[in-house]
Image (cartoon, rainbow, N blue to C red):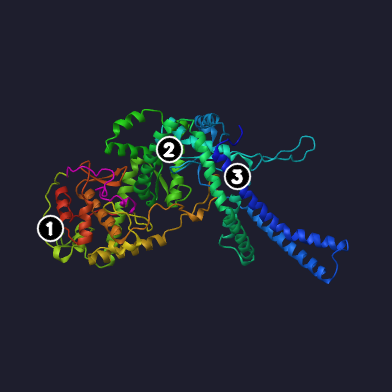
């Protein structure tokens, strides 16, 4: 293997790499220039050519300047050399746990005539890339070796290692083996240009500068270190700005060369596989934001997220009437069969996803436990609704709202839905509620909302799957995501009582989050020891909910609690829309618009009619946590 091919992109990448290395050489020349001048002056004085007071002063000045510049250059070089480049948090896959996967990647590298990746790792994201982990800080310590004759430690020469192949874990579960091979072909082909010495050296230089910037800007250092590190930061930022364009063009050239080389391998199948990449991304995004996020906020993390994305995409294909085409495709061998223990790998990537997207601990505990999909409705959905309903009634108690109403018995002291309805009803809409029948009426026969509709028509609105009482997350109602900051005021409820209650709920949530203990991890695995645990979550899923969304979430939760306690409804899980309410085994399909009518307009009539039709008794007390 030559390491770099004759592709035009590879040649362009090498020329850009040489430009980056020239910048490094110029920086070194600038650092050595005062020393060179001082040597010339000292040599001239010793030979009797450069004599006199002026030359003596110049010699002293340049010698002192040369020493200072060399010391500063040594400090900069030391920081750049010792700084640990950033490493993506991944789950390392050992070869003994996935021999078939390693065999497939090596066969692919042989077909592409490029070096095989040194290792394989998984990331909880829909992407794949090559990552250089040749820095000494990222390598395990070398075993101690002593010479058999001299009895002294033998010398070790570091050999250049190929980059690590990082694969998105949803790809392994959703794609077939042939599709995964076609998707990975352009990625694996990138090991060819990466093996070229000039490109590898340029990448190490840029990564070292980037890591040095992070070191110089790290907080919590004393004045003795801040001053020199500020100078180091200025120098490395200047060097980064100088080589930014060349480094970006070098990476584009590497990508172009890899894509050109990969055209000869499974090109036709790759076009089909790219469609599956888009589907996997859509299913993964919905699974995280609408299903996993509510569980994370409840202190539970789903332990089979990758298996869940398959269920979500299967449900998506069923709703979009694509089941026939997908059925034939699902008959092929899935790529997760290349793993010896896919369940253990799925659990590890699921825990890592919870850390990255929510900031959860690295280890399980009483307040951070795994949950299976079969237990999700009881462990997550039911608890979420009852916690939200309890918070709603706590806020009503703090506002002095009476627990008894016109539709409840005088001696009723428990939390009821009628209390919420009467309080949020505007004066012009206050009228006697229709009496509920003795037996529940049959539930609606309307179908559940199809994928792509803005309102999933479940008790928690499509974005309400995140509404478990934590600030910094989007709840969403009626399929509406958080609006831009300029539209925040338009999202506030028009009803004065609703606005006051929403503000009180926001304050209560902020108080709960402030009093919650920090979720710092007590330990890190070997593959996550080089990224800042204090910066979690690295990728927050959703922005904060508006006051209207927050109130709608809590009212919806109260309605669902009343349905479960008075009408025999059950909590459910919708793979695309998250928590859902099941009445007589069918998903409630028209609750969200009626709750919005109460919250925004103070009109309880649509919701009361829905409760009556569904056999829900709002005057009956409900069980809270």
Circle number at residue 433: 1
Q: Residue 392: horizontal and vertical position, in percent?
A: 28, 60
Label 2 or label 3, whichever comes before in sequence order: 3
- Give the magenta-colored segment's residue range: 444-467
| Front in this rendered view, residue 247 or 138 | 247
Does the magenta segment cover residue 448?
yes
Rendered position, 410 above or below 556: below
Residue displayed at 41% across by 62% down: 514
Q: Nearer the viewer, mark 2 or mark 3?
A: 3
Q: Nearer the viewer, mark 3 or mark 1?
A: 3
Q: Residue 121: horizontal and vertical position, in percent?
A: 51, 40
Quadrant where the N terminus lies? top right
| Front in this rendered view, residue 23 or 49 | 49
Residue designated by label 3: 15
Residue designated by label 2: 171
Does residue 137 appear in this view?
Answer: no
Is residue 205 rendered to the left or right of residue 536?
Answer: right
The Cα atoms of the two marked residues, 3 and 1, are separated by: 79 Å
Label 1 or label 2, whichever comes before in sequence order: 2
Q: How many marks?
A: 3
Rendered position, 583 above or below 604: above
Does the magenta segment cover residue 601?
no
Does residue 608 appear in this view?
Answer: yes
* Residues under numbered marks 1 and 2 in contact, where contact means CB atoms less than 8 Å apart: no
Look at the numbered disc 3 and give the secondary structure of its residue: helix
Residue displayed at 60% across by 46% down: 17
Quadrant where the C terminus lies? bottom left
Is residue 418 rendered to the left or right of residue 474?
Answer: left
Query: Label 3: few (<14), some or many (≥20) within 10 Å?
Result: some
The Cα atoms of the two marked residues, 2 and 3, are separated by: 35 Å
Look at the numbered disc 2 and give the secondary structure of its residue: helix
């Amino acid at each position: 293997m030559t390491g770099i091919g004759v592709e035009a992109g590879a040649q362009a990448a090498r020329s850009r790499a040489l430009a980056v290395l020239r910048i490094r050489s110029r920086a070194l020349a600038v650092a050595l220039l005062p020393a060179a001048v001082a040597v010339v002056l000292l040599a001239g004085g010793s030979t009797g050519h450069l004599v006199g007071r002026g030359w003596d002063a110049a010699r002293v000045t340049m010698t002192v300047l040369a020493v200072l510049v060399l010391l500063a250059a040594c400090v900069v070089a030391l920081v750049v050399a010792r700084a640990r480049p950033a490493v993506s948090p991944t789950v390392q896959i050992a070869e003994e746990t996935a021999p078939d996967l390693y065999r497939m990647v090596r066969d692919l590298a042989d077909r592409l005539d490029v070096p095989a990746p040194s290792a394989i790792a998984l990331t909880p994201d829909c992407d794949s890339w090559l990552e250089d982990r040749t820095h000494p800080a990222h390598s395990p310590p070398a075993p101690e070796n002593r010479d058999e004759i001299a009895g002294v430690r033998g010398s070790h020469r570091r050999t250049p290692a190929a980059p690590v192949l990082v694969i998105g874990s949803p790809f392994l579960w959703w794609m077939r083996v042939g599709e995964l091979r076609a998707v990975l072909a352009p990625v694996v082909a990138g090991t060819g240009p990466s093996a070229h010495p000039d490109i590898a050296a340029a990448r190490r230089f840029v990564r070292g500068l980037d890591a040095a910037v992070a070191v110089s800007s790290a907080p919590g250092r004393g004045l003795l270190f801040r001053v020199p590190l500020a100078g180091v930061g200025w120098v490395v930022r200047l060097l980064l700005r100088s080589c930014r364009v060349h480094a970006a063009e070098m990476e584009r050239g590497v990508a172009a060369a890899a894509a050109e080389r990969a055209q000869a391998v499974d090109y036709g199948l790759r076009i089909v596989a790219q469609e599956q990449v888009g589907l996997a991304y859509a299913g993964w995004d919905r699974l995280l934001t609408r299903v996993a996020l509510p569980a994370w906020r409840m202190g539970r993390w789903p332990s089979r997220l990758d298996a869940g994305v398959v269920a979500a995409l299967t449900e998506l294909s069923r709703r979009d009437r694509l089941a026939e085409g997908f059925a034939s495709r699902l008959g092929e061998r899935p790529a997760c069969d290349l793993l010896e223990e896919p369940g253990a790998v799925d659990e590890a990537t699921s825990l890592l996803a919870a850390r990255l997207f929510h900031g959860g601990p690295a280890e399980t505990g009483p307040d951070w436990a795994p949950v299976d999909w079969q237990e999700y409705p009881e462990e997550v959905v039911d608890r979420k609704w009852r916690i939200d309903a309890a918070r709603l009634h706590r806020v009503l108690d703090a506002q002095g709202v009476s627990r008894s109403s016109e539709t409840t018995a005088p001696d009723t002291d428990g939390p009821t839905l009628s209390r919420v309805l009467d309080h949020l009803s505007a004066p012009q809409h206050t009228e006697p509620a229709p009496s509920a029948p003795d037996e529940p009426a049959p539930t609606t026969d309307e179908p559940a909302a199809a994928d792509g509709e803005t309102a999933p028509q479940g008790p928690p609105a499509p974005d309400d799957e995140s509404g478990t009482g934590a600030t910094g997350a989007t709840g969403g109602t009626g399929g509406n995501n958080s609006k831009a900051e300029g539209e925040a005021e338009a999202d506030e409820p028009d009803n004065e009582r609703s606005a006051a209650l929403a503000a009180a709920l926001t304050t209560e949530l902020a108080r709960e989050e402030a009093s919650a203990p920090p979720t710092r991890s007590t330990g890190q695995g070997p593959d996550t020891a080089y990224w800042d645990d204090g910066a979690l979550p690295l990728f927050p899923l959703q922005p904060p909910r508006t006051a209207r969304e927050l109130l709608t979430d809590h009212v919806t939760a109260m309605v669902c609690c009343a349905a479960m306690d008075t009408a025999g409804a059950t909590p459910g899980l919708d793979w695309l829309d998250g928590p859902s309410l099941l009445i007589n085994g069918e998903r409630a399909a028209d609750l969200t618009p009626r709750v919005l009518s109460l919250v925004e307009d103070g009109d309880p009539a649509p919701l009361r009619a829905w409760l009556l039709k569904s056999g829900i008794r709002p005057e009956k007390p409900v069980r809270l946590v």
